[in-house]
Amino acid sequence: MTDHLNKPHGGELKNLLVSEEKAQQLKEESKHMPSWDLTERQICDLELLLNGGFSPLTGFMTRKEYENVCDSMRLPDGTVWPIPITLDITEELAQKLLPGDRLALRDPEGFMAAVLTIEDLWKPDKRKKAEAVYSTVNTEHPGVKYLFKESHTWYVGGRIEGIQLPEHYDFRELRLTPSELRAEFARLGWRRIVAFQTRNPMHRAHFELTLQAVRELQANLLIHPVVGMTKPGDIDHYTRVRCYQAILAHYPQHTVKLSILPLAMRMAGPREALLHAIIRKNYGCTHFIVGRDHAGPGSDSEGKPFYGPYDAQELLKEHAEEIGVEMVPFRMMVYSRKRACYIPVDEAKEDDGVLSISGTELRKRLAEGREIPEWFTFPEVAEELRRTHPPRHRQGFTVFFTGLSGAGKSTLAKALMVKLLEMGGRPVTLLDGDLVRKNLSSELGFSKEHRDLNIRRIGFVANEITKNGGIAICAPIAPYDAIRKEVRNLIEGSGGFVLVHVATPIEECERRDRKGLYAKARAGIIKEFTGISDPYEEPQDAEVVIDTTSLSPDEAAQDILLYLEREGYIGPGNQ
């Protein structure tokens, strides 16, 4: 049966999975191939290559494709493509490879997902890529930060032969490939399909704007949230998907479909909006809703937005006819108390009594256990959010001490731990700097790279404790601001995070120096010593600042407890 769906990008939906017989042959041959364990982002990219979501791509980009896309947002044959899809590897592996070699691509458990036949190996100019794709080299941008600080130094490109799609154990019925979703659309007789992308829960305003869009366009709706890598600190996809499922019943019957997308977002703003539209075209959609600052990471630390509010809409509008996807502008909806319904913000009158709740206000209401009004979100969605984000006094949290050696961090951390254990209600774990160095990071030195790795490990453990409702107390020196912020971003997605700067002056720290470390550092015997030969970056974002020069451990710990109580982390009877 012929369908009337939008044609895939490039004219043909790619399927890079080989036959079962060929897959078995590749598995046998892989015994003699070098291997690469894919990162989380690479697994997301590979899945969309294999299932055709990235059609017309047939593999990770070669150097020519990569440079074309960076420079002109086009593949060498002229097809529009805005973001490079590349495979980054270590220099150590790159030195062992040559064009024509085959590389087995494996998931972290060692299962082989695909074989890459190498056409190109090169060391990219990352700064040039950042300027082209992200329009900034500021590492406060999460995409730029990933590029400079997490991705490897070499790229390898070539054709992919897929063995199997990456394995998922969650929401399998919602993980529809482009061919499966197209078949479902054809079966239902859908032709005009509006795609709505989100990485956040949907509330009444989103419901109203999507409903209004499909009614105006006489189309059906695909809710197509991203469940791959999103912005650090986003609500986990398990909670979000349950929220999306809860909202479906409120749409008119036979008008909406929910499917989830294993995309690794780059937060690249306008270019990413164009990529999102192309992906939805491959899934059979004809229209794509684009909001203010679509796929943007917001603002930098000085409050300057990385992208203009309508840059994404403008770029997609410019290419809409060529790619065959119509851009639907996201109209901001607000609740009119007078009319008892949602209206576009540009239609609101002075006497409407407009109401809205920001994301920050929603998080605050959840943290404080306050009411979330029905005009803002459906009760089922509010209940799902409360399940995952209980009030602060029932959440796990981390108290993260930072300060110079001898400032009193360990003593204060132990005093706080004892007081919290005395209260009861939640398990408390102390991750002291010296003990972690001895048991978790014994092989590490004191270079910046090793210090950051040590703090990253502490952050990982603290996040697991926080995620499971416990209290983690961390007491390393943690001299560098960037890694402290990284740990904060990680943990705030799971619970509370309180940074305590033990700001005891270096003169007092030296006076207390029982081990003689400062004297040895000043004599040059100890290298890379914080405060003497290595910098300490004072935090500007500490929730609590304490100078222990004239405070006893009990008094200092009490100051922290008062802060925790004021912010709701300690409830009545610490329940």
Image (spheres, grey):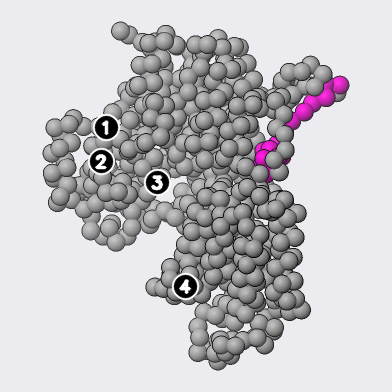
Q: Are marks 4 and 3 in contact (CB under 8 Å)?
A: no
Kindly state the secondary structure of the residue where label 2 is placed. strand
Residue situated in front as seen by the camera: 272 or 443 = 443
Q: List the residue tagged with mark 2.
A: 114
Q: List the residue tagged with mark 1.
A: 16
Residue 560 falls in image quadrant: bottom right
Residue 80 falls in image quadrant: top left
Give the mark toward the camera: 1 or 3: 3
Q: Amino acid at mark 3?
A: Glu
Residue for point 54% across, 90% down: 520
Kindly state the secondary structure of the residue where label 3 is placed. helix
Q: Amino acid at mark 2?
A: Ala
Q: Are marks 2 and 1 in contact (CB under 8 Å)?
A: yes
Figure check: 452 above or below 534? above
Q: List the residue tagged with mark 4.
A: 437
Q: In this view, which residue lies farthest toward the right?
A: 351
Residue segment shown in magenta: 351-367
Q: List the residue tagged with mark 3.
A: 40
Among numbered discs 1 and 3, the one appearing first in the sequence: 1
Residue for point 75% across, 76% down: 551
Image coordinates of residue 237 in percent, x first then y, are: 50, 37
Figure check: 526 above or below 321? below
